[in-house]
Amino acid sequence: MSKVTLKGLNSFGIAASCSDFVRFSSETEIQAWLTKNKNNSEQLFIIGGGSNLLLIGHVPFVLLQADVQGVEYIEQGNEVLVTAGAGVNWHQLVMETLDKGYYGLENLSLIPGNVGAAPIQNIGAYGVELKDLFVELEAIELATGDKITFTHQECDFAYRYSIFKGQYKGQYIITSVTLRLSKTPDLKLDYGLIRQELEHLSEDQITPKNVSDAVIKIRSGKLPDPNELGNAGSFFKNPIVDEVIYTRLKAQFPNLVAFELPDGRFKLAAGWMIDQAGLKGYRLGDAGVHKKQALVLVNYGDATGKDILQLARYVSQKVKQKFGVIIEPEVWILGEESW
Ligand SMILES: Cc1cc2nc3c(=O)[nH]c(=O)nc-3n(C[C@H](O)[C@H](O)[C@H](O)COP(=O)(O)OP(=O)(O)OC[C@H]3O[C@@H](n4cnc5c(N)ncnc54)[C@H](O)[C@@H]3O)c2cc1C
């Protein structure tokens, strides 16, 4: 089988290859392909917009992409059910819903990638997660070609997690996602710098569009645009620790940045820890820790997947040495090496 080049299909802009790449525009195309290839022993991997992947060398998989387009809206009183195809660009969906006066997604503006990937890690930003709006999704089981609906409960969402990263990892290709939005704004302003960005407006003047604009401005100011500097957003997850570890760390590092979770544990800001380990702006050849946001690793041009992985391991090791805490990748590492 010939090799397919993937440089343009991952936001790190890394040169990599895979065994084959198949793009589908409908569920029936996916089902037909699965039937035809059911005796094929090649391993399959689903790719969306490639913005949460680190590809290393040759990826010995057939990559499948559900490029299902289209968005449907069903109004139910003050609420609206929005069903979007897996191939719809996430940010465009956010913009379209805001334009129509359907609210809830404003804090999730400018997250790269496609709708089909959004449930996988329960995308989140500025105090809102996909699970807050999620109703159900449709997916096709790779082993059987069966179409299955997953409810909110069945997805088992948690911080940067769903059942598709656990028990059902790699088993389903998501074709559409349904969200419940509202015609009445319920603004979430207390996370990050949103309030500060909107301080020129009084609270009753603020609209969801203002919030979206603020989020876009804040994100653009601190996160590198993958079109200009290859990256996959936050490379590491924020580690979650129990109260005993949190208290010990807080005594040792009084400026520790942490958020208490409803279950009494604490989410530590990995970016702050990387910064404190002296690594913000650190560079290993063309692989670097971003100058403004230490949680983001970047490709300055010709970094290979291995270069980024080597840097990530170094960063993780330095954080462990300083804080005794292990930070783990949020991105999917695929190819000749693993974490
Ligand atoms: C600059 C930047 C900023 C970012 N900011 C955020 C942020 O604020 N919050 C956040 O949560 N994430 C963020 N991310 C990460 C990324 O945007 C999300 O993880 C996004 O959902 C990935 O979408 P994608 O389509 O590119 O998926 P890919 O990277 O292609 O795939 C990601 C995972 O989803 C699986 N997948 C993709 N499509 C499907 C499908 N149809 N069916 C089944 N599985 C599928 C893949 O197998 C893989 O496991 C950021 C990334 C970048 C580059």
Image: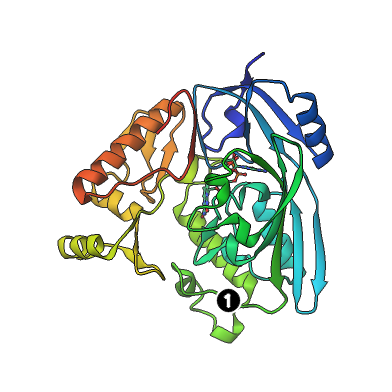
Give the colour scheme of this rendering.
rainbow
Where 288 sits versus 198, above or below? above
Q: Position of residue 25 (x, y in %)?
A: 80, 39
Name of the residue lying farthest toward the left: 252
Where 76 sits versus 212, above or below? below
Pick the residue in front: 99 or 272.
Answer: 272
Cβ(mark 1) to ligand 1 < 8 Å?
A: no
Where 212 sits versus 239, above or below? below
Q: Residue at x 75, y 62 (%)?
A: 82
Q: Position of residue 62 (x, y in %)?
A: 65, 25
Local secondary structure at mark 1 = loop
Which amino acid, mark 1?
A: Leu
Q: In the rendered image, is residue 26 in sight?
A: no
Where 267 sits versus 60, above or below? below
Number of numbered discs overlaid on the protein picture: 1
Q: Position of residue 115 (x, y in %)?
A: 67, 51
What residue does disc 1 label?
A: 187
Q: Is residue 33 left or right of residue 155?
A: right
Q: Residue at x 69, y 54 (%)?
A: 92
Q: Is residue 17 left or right of residue 271?
A: right
Q: Quadrant of residue 134?
A: bottom right
Q: Position of residue 334 (x, y in %)?
A: 50, 31
Q: Residue at x 73, y 76 (%)?
A: 183
**Quadrant including the C terminus:** top left
Q: In the rendered image, is residue 107 in sight?
A: yes
Question: Pointer 1: residues within 10 angstroms few (<14), some, or many (20+)?
Answer: some
Q: Is residue 280 left or right of residue 211?
A: left
Pick the residue in front: 260 or 54.
Answer: 260
**Quadrant including the N terminus:** top right
Q: Residue at x 81, y 71 (%)?
A: 75
